[in-house]
Amino acid sequence: MKKILLIVLFLCFLSVPVYAQSTLALQEKCAEGAKNFFKQHYTAYNKGEDFEVITQYTNHYNKKLDRCFIRVELLRTGKSQPKRMIFLYDAFEGEEYGWFCFDLEKETIFVCYVKNENCNSLGEFDKLIRPYLEE
């Protein structure tokens, strides 16, 4: 009986590094996919005649959902419609999960939702996207 228990425990410990390696590989694939998504969809937003757009992104592989998410933030400065926008996408499917848009000139929220749920502040938006960017 002790031999069987030791064999089971040994096999369990052997599987841990394999899982960690596969998770690392998925995280790396996610990072590459997010980089490609950002290049494809956001590199053209750099400059306009009377505005400039500052963009940045972060990515996260969510093990529980088995999805790669990219959070893209844009800050559009200048005289023409200054805005702060944040998007959440599935980096491989291109599906939009959320959008927050704040009009800097009028100091009002233009759009705020995550999936089918509306929000009324950046704090609420961040709270709604948190489950996608965790795990």
Image (tube, rainbow, N blue to C red):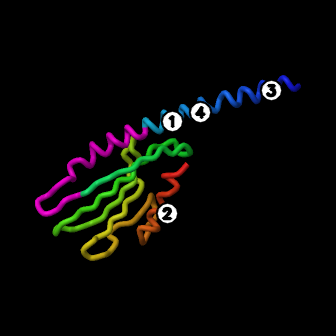
How many neighbours does mark 1 have within 10 angstroms: few (below 14), some (14-19), or many (20 or more)?
few
Give the dominant element type of the magenta stretch: helix, strand or loop.
helix
Side (left or right) of 54 relative to 135:
left
Q: Which residue is mark 4?
A: 19
Q: Which mark is residue 24?
A: 1
Of circles 4 and 3, which is in front?
A: 3
- Which residue is rendered at x = 27% and y = 43% of the image? 40
Looking at the picture, which amino acid does disc 1 mark?
Answer: Leu
Decide whether residue 68 is among the magenta residues. Answer: no
Decide whether residue 33 is among the magenta residues. Answer: yes
Q: Which mark is residue 127?
A: 2
Q: Are marks 4 and 1 in contact (CB under 8 Å)?
A: no
- Which residue is rendered at x = 28% and y = 61% of the image? 75
* Label located before the other in sequence (4 or 3): 3
- In this rendering, is residue 57 above or below 31? below
Looking at the picture, which amino acid does disc 4 mark?
Answer: Tyr
Count of numbered tags: 4
Residue 117: x and y in percent read: 46, 64
Looking at the picture, which amino acid does disc 3 mark?
Answer: Leu
Of circles 2 and 4, which is in front?
A: 4
Q: Are marks 1 and 2 in contact (CB under 8 Å)?
A: no
Of circles 3 and 2, which is in front?
A: 3
Report the quarter where the N terminus lies.
top right
Q: Which residues are magenta?
A: 30-53
* Label located before the other in sequence (3 or 1): 3
**C-alpha separation, residue under disc 3 versus residue under disc 1:** 28 Å
On the image, which quarter does residue 21 sit in? top right
Q: Are marks 3 and 2 in contact (CB under 8 Å)?
A: no
- In this rendering, is residue 88 above or below 66? below
Q: Which residue is mark 3?
A: 6
Q: Are marks 4 and 3 in contact (CB under 8 Å)?
A: no
